[in-house]
Structure formats: structure tokens, C-alpha cells
Image (cartoon, rainbow, N blue to C red):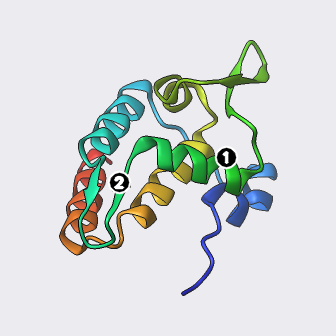
Amino acid sequence: MKKFIPFSQRYAASLLNKRLKIQLRKELRISLLRTMQKYSAYDSYHGIFITIERLIDRLMTQLGWKQLMIYENNEMQATDSFETFMEKTPHKHVIDAIEMYYHLLLGERQTHISFQEDVNHLF
């Protein structure tokens, strides 16, 4: 299996050079958060819980953070709230969270397909 590389790292140069621009309105961010919460459940195939907490741990590990980070008052700041993270983190990290959550759901075929369909309908 290929190693997962977050969107923000795969496209770092394009994002930095502003060749790739992302804008996610607040309503979309909230809808994405609610969709992720809907699929936060027990993965019976692997016998593990797929939860927002597991996603947070994976995000912080993958991005090298000690806490979730948001952009507020023209600077990056730490937050303990996943809801605040989804509303205020840079757009690229919202995409990271969605992709990473999808990868956490891959064990449950029908679940990850339903999640993918729900997210696609939001865009």
C-alpha cells in the first residue's frame, strides 16, 4: 500500500506559488464537519473505532503538530476543538482532514463509498 501524503504536502509548491488556490466557504466547512461526524463509528471489519479523535491524532502526526492549528488574527494558533479547526484552519488542511478521514474509512467498503458520495455531493 502506498504511503498517504496529505494534500497540503503533495501540492505544497503549487499552493505556495499560488498556482493552486482553494476557497471553502464557512457553510461548506460546517457541512463537511457534520458529514465526518455522521461517519464516526465502529469499524467492525478491523475491530476499531473510526472517530474524529483518531483523525486528529493522524493529522497531528502526519503534519508534525502538537495540537490542531488554526489561522486567526493573522497568525497560526493552537486549538483543542475539531469544530474550530474545521472552521478556521487554512483551506488546505480541511482537504487534508477529508482525505485522511476517507483513508481511515477504507476498511469498511460500503462506509467509505457512502462517505465519498456524501462529500462529493457537497461540492
Badge 2 or badge 1: first in the primary sequence: 2
In the rendered structure, find residue 49 and report the number of the disc placed on it. 2
Q: Which mark is residue 60?
A: 1
Q: Position of residue 104 (x, y in %)?
A: 43, 62
Between circles 2 and 1, the one closer to the viewer is 2
CA separation in Å, label 2 and label 1 = 18 Å
* Residue 61 x %, y %: 69, 53
- Residue extending farthest to the bottom is 1
Q: Nearer the viewer, residue 78 or 31?
A: 78
Residue visible at 59% across and 47% down in the picture: 57
User: Could you say whether the residue bearing mark 1 is in a helix, strand or loop?
Assistant: helix
Residue 78 at x, y percent in the picture: 71, 25
Q: Quadrant of the N terminus?
A: bottom right
Is 89 in front, or is 112? 112
The reply, left or right, for residue 116 in relation to residue 103 is left
**Quadrant assignment, res 8:** bottom right
Residue at image x 30%, y 46%?
40
Residue 39: give x, y in percent of width and height.
26, 49
Q: Which residue lies at the image location 46% right of the left edge and 26% below the top edge?
A: 83
Horizontal placement of 34 versus 110: left or right? Answer: right
Q: Does dot 2 land on a helix, a strand or a loop?
A: strand
Q: Is residue 61 above or below residue 22?
A: below
Type of amino acid under label 2: Phe
Disc 1 marks a residue whose amino acid type is: Met
